[in-house]
Image (tube, grey):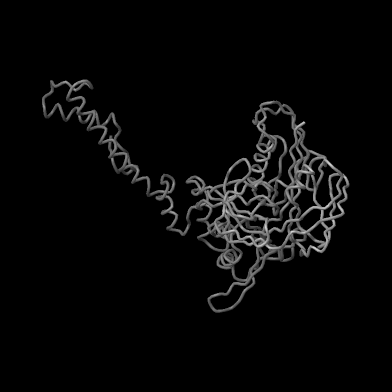
Amino acid sequence: MSFGLTSLGFTAKRLADITAELDTAFRTAFGAGIKTTPDTAFGKLIGVLADREVSIWELLEAVYNSQYPNTASGISLARIGEITAISPNPATKSAAILYVGGTNLTAIPVGSLVAVQDAGDQFETLAGATIAGSQKSVVSLTRSGATVTANVVAHGLTAGRRIWIDDAVEAEYNGLVQVTNVVDPNNFEYTITGTPTSPATGTITALPATAVNVQAIETGPIQALSGTLTEIVSSVPGWTRAENETDATKGEDAETDAEFRTRRIAALQGLGAATLNAIRGALLTVDGVSTAKVFENVEAVTDPATGRPGHSFEALVLGGVDQTILNSLFDKKSAGIQTYGTTSGTVTDSQGNDHTVSFSRPASVSIWIEIDLTVNADFPGVLEVESRVLAFGDALDIGEDVIVYPALIGSFDDVPGITDVAIRIGTAASPTLDDNIIITETQLADFDSARLTVITV
């Protein structure tokens, strides 16, 4: 049998081959009658030398494999991608908008830390922030069901500002007391989750709040659902409240070798020009683009179903920077063929002429879900189910339907302690059915913890 580099590729010697060769060599050198069993001096020496030679052959095989995309791994695979300007996507960090509250004019330094309640994952502020505004008295509280409406006397808040009610009211009313998106500067509402221990009347204090961008310390899909980024880790006098109003945008783990190989094959089609595969392949090489689809209208008239003009194409892109996407589309499209989409911009060609280029982002379809769980003592808590459902939603691609049975239910069916499940799902609040949600080719299902309710019964 031939070893090393042959016409069929590379064939490495294995331990059995090397041991047999060394045994023959030793008998030739020292005599055919020597003993080479593993318990003898010659046998032990053969074993040591064979192990070392195996390592050398394995290294040679790894070097050979590192030259080819289907067998290379790690940095070797990345360098193969660099030949055609394609690189593995690095790990990214989760990010969120954090509202900080407390004493007026308190300065919160850049790099201040907060953590996700219970989970402990830490986020840091990306810029310094100063809490702006002063405490204001709130009077004339009136309660209707779970909603308390408060009239604020001359607090001077601008539309869109966020304020909090102080801790004393949280204790008094036994529930959630943050206030968001103030539209009327003299009135606002907040919702409580328990039964007030006293009538909803009296005078309380509103605290000012300021928004600041935060980013997870660790890379990867660190989860911070709305209202959970509340534990202040850094000690800053005057900083008393922190909370994210919406779910954090989750980061990504570094692209695996298998994922990169798949994307590289699709992207290589972008080395051509004008074809749909070439346009899509080029888009997949744009930094930050995770998904791209391209649709065309080959007819001479506008497609009444999609609005695409005659002889045009529409690129549907998830992720990436708008201008970089526009540049990529202009470089790959055919002369005289127009682009179509809801996002437009200008690309200047090599002759100094400006061209309008368009593409689309997938239309977001808000998904509302209510899940009733019958549980026993083994159940770890609703957060585990919420996390599973949101992860299921994150994994859905453009144009992919939301399949309730068995896909969505299956995302949490192995959570211990669940004895029965009732689910309601829809595209508006208070869904009543458990039907699948049909997503068109230009839409993307959008899951969010603010639209997900999981209760135990």
The x and y percentages for residue 225 are 66, 46
Residue located 78% across and 65% down the image: 156
Looking at the rendering, in which quadrant would you find the N terminus? top left
Residue located 44% across and 45% down the image: 70
Q: Is residue 77 left or right of residue 202?
A: left
The x and y percentages for residue 160 are 75, 61
Front residue (pair 139, 360): 139
**Quarter of image, res 372:** top right
Q: Is residue 201 above or below residue 11?
A: below
Front residue (pair 239, 266): 239
Front residue (pair 168, 113): 168
Q: Is residue 209 left or right of residue 81?
A: right
Q: Is residue 431 left or right of residue 83?
A: right
Q: Is residue 81 left or right of residue 303?
A: left
Looking at the rendering, in which quadrant would you find the C terminus? top right
**Quarter of image, res 363:** bottom right
The x and y percentages for residue 353 are 59, 78
Front residue (pair 27, 50): 50
The x and y percentages for residue 15 are 29, 31
Residue located 63% across and 57% down the image: 317
